[in-house]
Image (cartoon, rainbow, N blue to C red):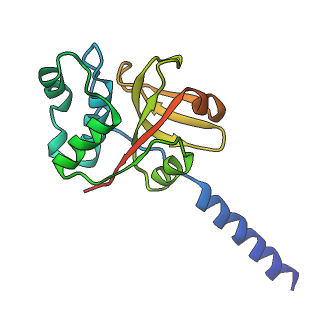
Amino acid sequence: DTSEASMMRALLVLLMFAASASADCKIRVHVANINPGCCAWASLETIGRHLGYDETQGLAEWYVKQAPDYGQASPDYIETQLREFGIEHETCKTGDLEVLRRAARRGLPALIGFKSSSSLGAHACVFKHIDDRHVYFHDCNHGADTFQFDIEDFKEQSSGWFVVIEPK
C-alpha cells in the first residue's frame, strides 16, 4: 500500500529529526566573570545555579579568595572541586562533539574551554546548544548574550575540554 509506505517514510524522517534535534538550554541566571580570570568558575556557578546546586553558589567569589594568582582553573582542578562537592559530571578532553550533542538532547548546559590561541583567548564559557552548523554559548564576560561559532571554527578554537554536569 502506497499510503502506508508514505506514512512509514514520514515517521522515519520525523524520528531522525527528533533524534538529531537538540534543545537550547534556557539559562535564567548568568554569573559574571570577576576579572581577571575566573571565567571557568563563573561558568560553573552559572551551570550549577541553572541545575539547582547550592554547592556552586558563590563559587566565582570563592575562587578569587582561594586562588588570588588565578592559577587553579585547570580541568583537573575543576574536576577535583566537582568531586569534592559530590557533583556528578562527564568530562571530555578530546573535543568529541558527541558529548555536547548528548548534553543538548537532554537540555543540559556544559562548560566549554577555548585555547589561548583562540579569538577569545584562554577562556571558558557555558555551552547552550549545537545544531548541524553552529555551536551556541554564553560568555560570562558579556551578560546574557548568546554567541556562536560555526562547527569548524569551534573545533579550531576549542581546547576540546567540555564538562557536562548531571542534574540533581
The image quarter containing residue 68 is top left
Query: Is residue 74 rendered to the left or right of residue 95?
Result: left
Image quadrant in which the C terminus is located? bottom left
Query: Is residue 107 rendered to the left or right of residue 94?
Result: left
- Residue at the right extreme? 2
- Residue at the top extreme? 36
The image quarter containing residue 26 is top left
Residue 117 position (above or below residue 165): above
Image quadrant in which the N terminus is located? bottom right
Residue 161 placed where, x, y %?
44, 38
Q: Residue at x 24, y 45 (%)?
A: 82
Residue 60 placed where, x, y %?
21, 27
Residue 120 position (above or below residue 5): above
Residue 120 position (above or below residue 83): above
Residue 78 placed where, x, y %?
28, 37
Q: Nearer the viewer, residue 86 or 19?
A: 86
